[in-house]
Amino acid sequence: MRGARVPSAARNARSFAFEHPGAVLAAILLVCIVVASALAPVIAPYDPFDLSSLDVLDAELPPWWRSGSDPRFLLGTDAQGRDLLSAILYGTRISLTVGVLAVLIQAVIGVSLGLFAGYRGGAIDSLVSRAADIQLSLSTLMMAIIALALFRAGLGGDALSRYAVPLLVVVIGLAEWPYFARTARAATQVEAAKDHVRAARALGLTGFGVVRRHILPNVLSPLIVVATTQVAGAIMNEAALSFLGLGMPVTKPSLGTLIRSGYDLIFAGAWWVTVIPGLVLVALLVSVNVLGDALRDALNPRARRR
Amino acid sequence: MRAAAAALAFSMRRLAQALLVMLAILVIAFAVRSALGDPLREIVGEAVPEAEREALRHQLGLDAPWPVQLARYLAGAAHGDLGTSLIYKRPTLDVVLAKFPASFELVLGASLIVLLLSVPAGIYCAVRPRALPARLILGLSVLGISVPVFLTGIFLITIFSVWLGWLPAFGRGETIRIGFWETGLLTPDGLKHLILPALTLSSILLPLFIRLVRGAMLDELDHDYVRTARAKGASPPRVWFAHALRNALIPLVAVGGLQVGTLIAYTLLTETVFQWPGMGFLFLEAVTRSDIPLITTYLVAVGFLFVVVNTLVDIASLALDPRISLEGAP
């Protein structure tokens, strides 16, 4: 090893920042959004869930840069007189929560199946791969729409509103495990053929032990890239479902619900009620996606040529 | 001869598979119907007293064991009878099929935009990967993938309908009836109404297809036959279009087939934004008003579309690519 210089973590980070200036901007934007939404109860001027504080006289006020705005409501108000800024802060929080929890479910299912299939091979492997193919050919969004639509048609809109968060998490989380499974499987197959894994097996470690101690740590980086793009996808699917009226209820709005409830006001001229949450959603998704692309480049330099 | 026989056998097997999947979809639709809906409500409504309901139920055979009812449902389905809509009081299949032209024309418009733009853009990005426009296209495609389709629609409506007032924001406009097909493509008003929805739907597919065309082209351009064609003195456009593109299209057809479900979901979202009176819009109306027979019929119709497209794609890939060998296939 003498003479070879292992670059330090700080140096790595610096060169990453230099090569991907867009990713740094995206990361800063993402951190701002996440922190602001996490601190929503502290920094939001109003509590958007407290219906008693709403005053219809404040309805549809424009944001600060337009005439007729009210200094109490920085980004204006919606049809019920709810402060848009507070609603957006809380809404982003819900969108992020649903997205991250759904991806957690995907990751747990997908990674365990992928590790298992990749390490064992044979019939189990072809079974998992076939199941993954079938699952992917059924579009997640369509399956989620159907599942939630049947729930709503069968048990009614009230039941859907009450259980919206767990339902969305499960419906979005169950469908997209194949992305994790495929990545984990491919990386496991490469790793399992390496000497350190064979040595561990020769030393008498159980299959579970080998996978946990010697394979999983080495296949984590491609999985992190998958997780990033999946979070963006999950947030987008949640927004789409809520926009269709099959997700978060108006009383507990996510960004998608805010866009839906403001949609009718566009034609009345109050476009900001729907466009501002829309822009926040786009900012969130773009920053996650750009960061994901940059991570993929950084962790897999071979793909950069393309 | 052997190859032709193998191709025929393959097509027959795919057809048999497709029929099996359709049967499974119908069984699921039946299960949903029995679990969530009351068939008697379809026929007599809510106003009939309970004792009379029981008598009717017996008379109509609705208290029969479920295998009998399933057989009856499947027999009805074979004749195109999937129940009666609670909202429209008409056979559900008629209601769903009447909305099909609207959805089809929306998808057609969007596909045309995608096809006309993604192929040249994808080829350009593959042959000039370092050029500024190529980087710009790829950068914009990340943005395109990040904007949900319903938001694109809302942004377009805000700009072109509310602010500028150039284009209509909802509905199909003036339509002409040709047989059972109600088309909006033959009137200026109908075409005007199609522009924003078709643009919206294509906005989500375009980035995906540009990336697909680019990736497939990059793969093909690495091959020896491309070098041979260049060495023979074929002009660059001829090499790109006549040689590489033809082969690059094969994986595109397969991936395109896989996207049917997603396309249906995006169409549903676009129809909701623009209140486009298609199948997706109808489905959401049925959901809000708990019209179970209509909901299940929509699911059967969508499942049918999905099965047909996937079967066609499988058979088409076989026809497009002589390298796919069926010898020794299971």
Image (cartoon, coloured by chain):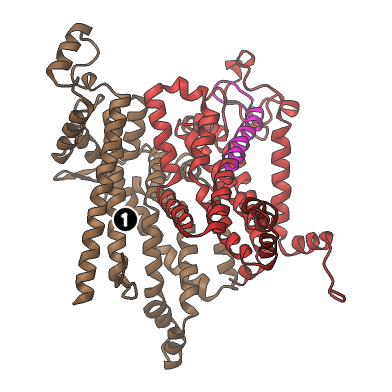
**Horizontal and vertical percent position of residue B164:** 47, 44
Q: Secondary structure at mark 1?
A: helix
Identified at 63% across, 69% down, the residue is A304
Q: Is residue A238 above or below residue B57?
A: below
Q: Which is nearer the eye, A200 or A81?
A: A200
Which chain identifier belongs to the brown chain? B
Quadrant of image for the C terminus of chain B: bottom left
**Horizontal and vertical percent position of residue B9:** 21, 65
Residue bounds of the magenta highlight: A77-104
Q: Is residue A116 left or right of residue A297?
A: left
Which image quadrant for residue A244?
Answer: top left
Q: Is residue A132 above or below residue B97?
A: below
Inspect this view and state whether residue A148 appears.
Answer: yes
Q: Amino acid at mark 1?
A: Asn
Q: Is residue B98 left or right of residue A302?
A: left
Q: Which is nearer the eye, A79 or B150?
A: B150
**Horizontal and vertical percent position of residue B147:** 53, 48
Identified at 61% across, 68% down, the residue is A303
Quadrant of image for the N terminus of chain B: bottom left
Q: How many marks?
A: 1
Q: Colour of chain A?
A: red
Mark 1 Cα shell of 10 Å, populated few (<14), some (14-19), many (≥20): many
Which image quadrant for residue A252?
Answer: top right
Q: Which is nearer the eye, B261 or B208?
A: B261
Q: Is residue A97 magenta?
A: yes
- Single out the residue that lies furthest toward the bottom: B232
Residue hosting label 1: B310
Q: Main secondary structure of the magenta part?
A: helix
Inspect this view and state whether residue A272 appears.
Answer: no
**Horizontal and vertical percent position of residue B149:** 47, 46
